[in-house]
Image: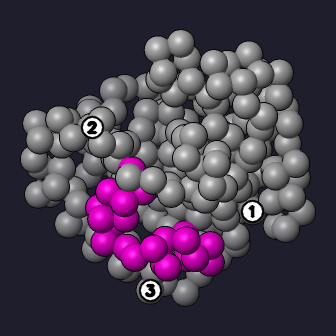
């Protein structure tokens, strides 16, 4: 496992791609996983803040996500409890309008199956956003439709929207997310953390 983390940390497959973005940054993979994790969080890719700090969800989105899960920072960042495995381990950069670029497919093609195999059977998986949901669940559909159908995958898998503050409007339009999905997700998080893997 340590060898795999070191391999990912040293990856520079996207060096030329990132130099061609508006941010012109160098790769900084942020692998955050260990065997025995009880909760697997799969998102899109690190943002600029994570690129700078080297710690996933070290931003306002992370604050909201931890609130959704009712999980304190100590537990969230304990890699024996929580594995954070995005579709790409590096910040992909911004486009000309300042939006995050999509996670490069080569990252998942190179690393994803190896990482998931190394984790083994994780009791609870949380899929954040379309890229992770489509990869893990197959058929492509909108994040809204996927999250509306969350019961099709519970209790082992929960699709959720990105906890970005840009999605505040979506959350207001979809109060069932907080009223129905989050209480069940929190219950399953609590159960997973009590599991002996």
Mark drawn on residue 194:
3
Which residue corresponds to mark 2?
167
Quadrant that contains the N terminus: bottom right
Q: Is residue 110 left or right of residue 132?
A: right
What is the secondary structure assignment of the residue under circle 3? loop
Taking the spot 58% from the left edge, 49% from the top edge, the residue there is 50
Give yes or no for contact between labels 1 and 2 (Cβ–Cβ under 8 Å).
Answer: no
Give yes or no for contact between labels 3 and 2 (Cβ–Cβ under 8 Å).
Answer: no
Please tell me which of labels 1 and 2 falls first in the chain: 1
Taking the spot 47% from the left edge, 14% from the top edge, the residue there is 97
Residues in magenta? Answer: 61-82
Q: Is residue 138 visible?
A: no
Which residue corresponds to mark 1?
118
Taking the spot 47% from the left edge, 23% from the top edge, the residue there is 99
Please provide percent x and percent y for residue 149. Answer: 25, 42
Please provide percent x and percent y for residue 16. Answer: 83, 21
Q: Nearer the viewer, residue 28 or 83?
A: 28
For mark 3, does the 10 Å Cα neighbourhood hold few (<14), some (14 to 19), or many (20 or more) residues? Answer: few
Taking the spot 42% from the left edge, 56% from the top edge, the residue there is 62
Gap between marks 1 and 3, in whole Å?
21 Å
Please provide percent x and percent y for residue 51. Answer: 64, 45
What is the secondary structure assignment of the residue under circle 2? helix
The image quadrant of residue 54 is bottom right
Closer to viewer: mark 1 or mark 2: 2
Quadrant that contains the C terminus: bottom right
Q: Nearer the viewer, residue 126 or 29?
A: 29
Taking 105 as reference, is 182 above or below it?
A: below
């Amino acid at each position: 496992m340590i060898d795999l983390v070191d391999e990912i940390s040293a990856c520079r497959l996207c060096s030329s791609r990132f130099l061609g973005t508006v941010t012109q940054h160098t790769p900084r993979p942020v692998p955050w996983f260990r065997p025995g994790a009880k909760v697997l969080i799969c998102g899109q890719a690190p943002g600029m803040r994570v690129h700078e700090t080297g710690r996933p969800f070290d931003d306002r989105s992370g604050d909201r996500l931890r609130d959704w899960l009712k999980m304190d920072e100590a537990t969230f960042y304990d890699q024996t409890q929580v594995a954070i495995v995005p579709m790409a381990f590096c910040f992909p950069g911004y486009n000309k309008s300042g939006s995050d670029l999509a996670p490069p497919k080569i990252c998942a093609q190179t690393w994803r199956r190896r990482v998931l195999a190394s984790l083994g059977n994780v009791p609870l998986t949380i899929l954040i956003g379309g890229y992770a949901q489509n990869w893990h669940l197959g058929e492509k559909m909108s994040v809204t439709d996927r999250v509306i159908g969350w019961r099709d995958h519970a209790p082992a898998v929960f699709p959720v929207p990105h906890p970005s503050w840009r999605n505040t409007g979506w959350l207001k339009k979809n109060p069932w997310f907080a009223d129905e999905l989050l209480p069940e997700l929190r219950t399953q998080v609590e159960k997973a953390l009590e599991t002996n893997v």
